[in-house]
Image: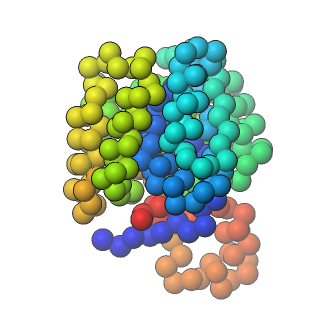
Amino acid sequence: MLALRATGVSRIVALGAHCDDIAIGAGGTLLTLCSASPGIRVDALVLSGGGTEREDEERAALAAFCPNADLEVSVLKLPDGRLPVHWDEAKNALEELRSRTEPDLVLAPRTEDAHQDHRGLATLVPTAFRDHLVLGYEIVKWDGDLGRPVAYQPLTDDIAEDKVRLLQEHYPSQRHRPWYDREAFLGLARIRGIECHAHYAEGFSVTKAVLDLGGIMQNDPATAGRQARASGRCGSPHR
């Protein structure tokens, strides 16, 4: 399998509708990137849970999932399950974040996600981050909406285990949920690993990516300028 490497990732935006979405969907990828690049900038925005115990959980969890990163976390107070009627607040929050960062990579929910809050956020992402590499993470749930990823980030055994441990350690408010357990998280990671010839992996959807396999954009001044402004590089952060 050809690995398309997203080189030079120094700034990441991580977006979630709820506290724990980012960690469940892309926690292993964050651990991989942040461990490999100390000082990497991570701007995380979560739309709900602000002012509750869930915000405290999220801040502690993301600090653990982003070791040695320059991390900024914002947790808003939009009500859970009501994103469609709080569209303007969500849109404004994304636009405000976009105004102060130029990320190389955006981690966000998938547009195919069955949860209306996840799906709504995913729909808003390309309206603010128009020229960026956006990886849509998946969250296992009762709705049975898992699809067929097109990009994979392999995880070492240690990182896969660390992800599960940190999820259990930092989100005690979620432990009562019947699906919130080691078997569910490692099981999905094992399946995604099989699909990309690894032991464990996280799977992502990609709405749009530009390939530069022949170095055309690098050698053409006009397209090189656009490429420099549009930080979304081709492929997945594979290995």
* Left or right side of 155 for 232: right
* Left or right side of 235 for 128: right
Residue at image point 27% right, 33% down: 182
Total numbered labels: 0
User: Which residue occupies the foreground of this view, 233 or 123?
Assistant: 233
The quadrant of the rendering that contains the N terminus is: bottom left
Q: Give x and y (percent) for residue 118.
A: 48, 31
| Quadrant of residue 150 within the rendered picture | bottom left
Residue at image point 64% right, 80% down: 218
Is 44 located above or below residue 168 in the figure? Answer: below
* Left or right side of 78 for 189: left
Q: Give x and y (percent) for residue 7.
A: 56, 69
The quadrant of the rendering that contains the C terminus is: bottom left
Q: Give x and y (percent) for residue 203.
A: 36, 50
- Residue 138 visible? The answer is no
Residue at image point 39% right, 70% down: 3
Q: Give x and y (percent) for residue 100.
A: 77, 45
Is 210 located above or below residue 69 in the figure? Answer: below
Specify how the rendered protein is coloured.
rainbow
User: Which residue occupies the foreground of this view, 190 or 169?
Assistant: 169
- Residue 45 visible? The answer is yes
User: Which residue occupies the foreground of this view, 42 or 45?
Assistant: 42
